[in-house]
């Protein structure tokens, strides 16, 4: 197949500049918003501050984009154990915090999908007949109970978190998906893709994080999103190119944050007496 990325001409690049900037702005808000979820779940008694917690979240997400997605959660699990200056978070609590954060994403995506598209289309995009998700949830619960029986934590666990915080966490996850949706729609709207079809494309590409491919979602992301956009009437070559651009813009905020943190740490290390 001879695929030419026709939109990379000078005139098309100029036309895409403003939508790309708007997309990047929306995608930059989304990770800052989602990083607040762990802060809601981590007990205040732990003494963990927002800045290092946000840094751990960003690094974990960046790792997930360039390796097996689960490795990002493994990194966060290990890093959360060393953030507290008072008492390290027990392994069971860390597993709970990460599991409820991921669960909120899985819970809110179908709800947002129903809100912005028709129910029949959402059901087609999210099959629920497979027992694997249920088995995974049961495995996490069993592991948490096992670890809690072996080591007790002096800090409040997930069971003591107030319901209003859980509700706020779910709300943040929903807003995060809406920001993703608007970011994608801003990019593809000039090609005539309606908001409802952009929602279906977003649901489709969320499946790209499921297979444990060692190179992250690169290639798989572009293929799934490109095919979904092609179903909306965009030529296949342009659809794949737009999907690739959206993927780069999605990863860019995480890369900028991690790089800026590394540079700031290097600068502080060269200045005597700096914190």
Image (spheres, rainbow, N blue to C red):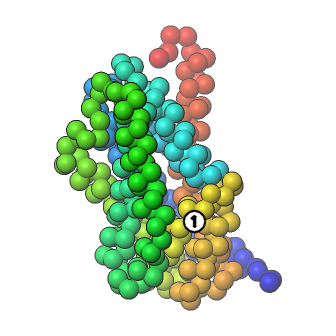
Crowd band around label 1 with a 10 angstrom C-alpha radius: few (<14), some (14–19), many (20+): many
Quarter of the rendering containing residue 244: bottom right
Query: Horizontally, is 60 left or right of 241 in the view?
Result: left
Residue 21 in the image, given as x and y percentages of width and height: 51, 62
Q: Residue at (38%, 48%) from the top-left corner?
A: 141
Q: Nearer the viewer, residue 237 or 112?
A: 112
Asked if residue 113 is positioned above or below residue 150 in the image, the reply reads below
Q: Residue at (60%, 73%) from the top-left corner?
A: 224
Question: Where does label 1 land, which residue?
Answer: 208
Q: Across the whole image, how many numbered discs are drawn on residues?
A: 1
Q: Nearer the viewer, residue 158 or 242?
A: 158
Asked if residue 192 is positioned above or below residue 84 in the image, the reply reads below
| Residue 37 visible at all | yes
Q: Residue at (62%, 52%) from the top-left corner?
A: 68
Residue 100 in the image, given as x and y percentages of width and height: 36, 49
Q: Residue at (49%, 85%) from the top-left corner?
A: 192
Judging from the image, what secondary structure is the residue with disc 1 in?
Answer: helix
Query: Horizontally, is 111 left or right of 207 in the view?
Result: left
Residue 103 in the image, given as x and y percentages of width and height: 38, 56
Asked if residue 220 is positioned above or below residue 99 in the image, the reply reads below
Query: Horizontally, is 83 left or right of 224 in the view?
Result: left
Q: Quadrant of the N terminus?
A: bottom right
Asked if residue 23 is positioned above or below residue 232 in the image, the reply reads above
Quarter of the rendering containing residue 51: top left
């Amino acid at each position: 197949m001879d695929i030419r990325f026709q939109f990379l001409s000078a005139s098309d690049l100029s036309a895409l500049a403003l939508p790309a900037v708007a997309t990047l702005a929306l995608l930059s808000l989304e990770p800052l918003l989602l990083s607040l979820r762990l802060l809601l779940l981590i007990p205040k008694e732990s003494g963990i501050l927002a800045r290092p917690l946000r840094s751990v979240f960003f690094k974990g997400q960046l790792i997930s984009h360039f390796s097996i997605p689960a490795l990002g959660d493994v990194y966060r699990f290990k890093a959360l154990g060393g953030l507290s200056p008072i008492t390290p978070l027990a392994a069971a609590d860390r597993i709970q915090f990460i599991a409820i954060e991921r669960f909120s994403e899985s819970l809110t995506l179908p709800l947002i999908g129903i809100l912005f598209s028709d129910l029949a289309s959402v059901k087609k995009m999210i099959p629920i007949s497979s027992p694997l998700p249920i088995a995974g949830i049961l495995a996490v619960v069993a592991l948490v109970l096992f670890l809690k029986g072996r080591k007790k934590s002096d800090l409040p666990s997930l069971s003591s978190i107030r319901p209003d915080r859980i509700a706020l966490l779910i709300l943040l996850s929903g807003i995060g998906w809406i920001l993703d949706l608007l970011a994608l729609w801003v990019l593809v709207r000039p090609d005539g893709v309606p908001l409802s079809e952009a929602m279906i494309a977003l649901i489709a590409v969320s499946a790209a994080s499921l297979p444990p491919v060692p190179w992250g979602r690169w290639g798989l992301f572009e293929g799934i999103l490109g095919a979904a956009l092609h179903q909306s009437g965009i030529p296949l070559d342009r659809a794949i190119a737009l999907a690739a651009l959206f993927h780069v813009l999605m990863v860019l905020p995480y890369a900028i944050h991690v790089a800026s943190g590394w540079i700031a740490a290097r600068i502080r290390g060269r200045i005597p007496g700096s914190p």
